[in-house]
Image (spheres, helix red, strand yellow):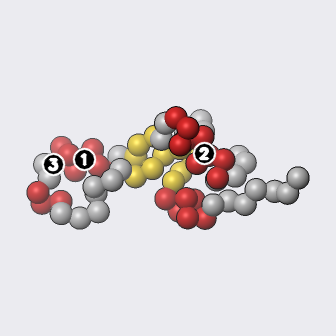
Amino acid sequence: MPKLKTHKGLHKRVKLSARGKVLHKRSGAGHLMSGKSGRRRQRLRRKLAMTGALARKAALALGPR
């Protein structure tokens, strides 16, 4: 069986935590910050854990741990 290659595009956008959770940046934090409240901007700075089938698929695309 051949080795699985790491999906480089996903590797740049996503991080695997120590417990195996797939963490990603929230959407909406790219620009136009002046129209958003400080509390909302604070929340947008935090990473979010992917859930469900998408998280399992992403973890597989990142290769074995």
Q: Amino acid at mark 2?
A: Lys
Residue 59 percent coordinates (x, y): 62, 46
**Local crowd size for mark 3, using a 10 Å CA cut-off: few (<14), some (14–19), many (≥20):** few
- Is 46 situated above or below 29? above
Q: CA distance from mark 2 to mark 3?
A: 34 Å
Tell me the residue that label 1 is attached to: 42
Check disc 2 and report its element: helix, strand or loop.
helix
Check disc 3 and report its element: helix, strand or loop.
helix
Per the rendering, the mark at residue 38 is: 3
Marked residue nearer the N-terminal end (1 or 2): 1
Check disc 1 and report its element: helix, strand or loop.
helix
Q: CA distance from mark 3 to mark 1?
A: 6 Å
Residue 23 percent coordinates (x, y): 48, 46
State the residue at coordinates (51%, 54%): 14
Q: Amino acid at mark 1?
A: Gln
Callout 1–callout 2 Cβ contact below 8 Å: no
- Quarter of the figure with residue 5: bottom right
Per the rendering, the mark at residue 57 is: 2
Marked residue nearer the N-terminal end (2 or 3): 3
Callout 3–callout 1 Cβ contact below 8 Å: yes
Residue 54 percent coordinates (x, y): 53, 43
| Callout in the foreground (1, 2) | 2
State the residue at coordinates (27%, 55%): 28
